[in-house]
Image (cartoon, rainbow, N blue to C red):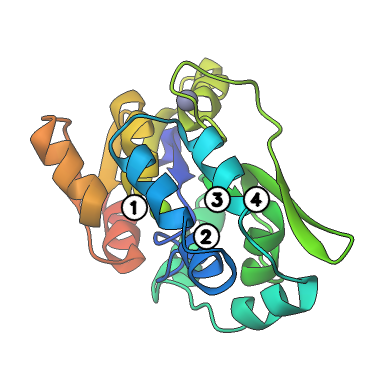
């Protein structure tokens, strides 16, 4: 696959960041019942939209609380260099996240060379409020990564998906090439979805350089 003819679709939580920010928000600010909701989602009984809506309704936190937590989040050690390589080679990057726009923009700071499809988070009356913008889909996704990949398919670039978790399971089946780690790696192996394992964006940057 020649990388000048590809487009990256990249998960955010646990992929671009070393930690899953949504999980950190829930652990710190939600009533403990969020874990019961999580179990229903892991088992496939509810989609991520219902899961996240119910979990975020259990959260009590101000914008200031969130700001403090976000200051503790770190990026994958190879991500910024990977992004520089993509810019240099004019390879488009789209972040597809079941997390939140506010979190992603804040954590990535001045970096803005990417498209973004995610959920919304706002501070309303001193508390955080989540909302969803995309159409409801057959999987019950909060933000459907399959729909995002399909939306871009018309220009003929191959889709390369990078992810780490179960919120990437549908996208992994829809992309032309998948880089997987952690639970997504187990999932791809179990479902026999063709994939390459990776440990950081340094591996993906090396692949990108080699294939262009
Ligand atoms: Mg993730
Ligand atoms: Zn979906």
Q: Earlier in the sequence, mark 2 or mark 1?
A: 2
Picture disc at residue 22: 2
**Residue drawn at (39%, 76%) of the image:** 77
Residue 171 place in picture, x, y as percent: 38, 32
Residue 138 place in picture, x, y as percent: 47, 16
**Residue drawn at (29%, 26%) of the image:** 173
The answer to whether residue 69 is seen in the rendering is: yes
**Contact? badges 2 and 1 (CB < 8 Å):** no
Give the spatial CA distance, label 4 vs label 1: 41 Å
Give the spatial CA distance, label 4 vs label 3: 5 Å
Using a 10 Å C-alpha cutoff, classify the residue at mark 2 as few (fewer than 14 neighbours), some (14 to 19) or many (20 or more).
some
Residue 193 place in picture, x, y as percent: 17, 30
Give the spatial CA distance, label 1 vs label 3: 37 Å
Q: Earlier in the sequence, mark 2 or mark 3?
A: 2
**Residue drawn at (62%, 76%) of the image:** 70
Picture disc at residue 55: 3
Circle nearer the viewer, 2 or 3: 3
Q: Earlier in the sequence, mark 1 or mark 3?
A: 3
């Amino acid at each position: 696959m020649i990388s000048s003819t590809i487009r990256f679709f990249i998960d955010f939580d646990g992929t671009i960041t070393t930690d899953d920010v949504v999980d950190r928000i829930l652990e710190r600010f939600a009533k403990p019942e969020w874990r019961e909701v999580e179990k229903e989602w892991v088992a496939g009984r509810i989609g991520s939209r219902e899961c996240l809506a119910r979990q975020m309704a259990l959260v009590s936190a101000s914008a200031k609380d969130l700001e403090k937590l976000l200051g503790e989040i770190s990026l994958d050690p190879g991500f910024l260099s990977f992004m520089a390589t993509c810019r240099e080679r004019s390879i488009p990057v789209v972040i597809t996240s079941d997390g939140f726009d506010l979190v992603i923009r804040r954590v990535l700071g001045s970096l803005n060379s990417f498209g973004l499809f995610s959920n919304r988070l706002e501070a309303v009356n001193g508390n955080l409020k989540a909302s969803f913008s995309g159409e409801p889909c057959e999987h019950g996704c909060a933000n459907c990564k399959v729909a995002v990949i399909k939306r871009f398919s018309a220009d003929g670039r191959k889709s390369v998906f990078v992810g780490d978790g179960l919120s990437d399971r549908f996208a992994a089946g829809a992309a032309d090439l998948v880089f997987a780690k952690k639970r997504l790696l187990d999932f791809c192996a179990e479902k026999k979805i063709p994939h390459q394992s990776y440990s950081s964006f340094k591996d993906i940057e090396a692949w990108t350089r080699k294939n262009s």
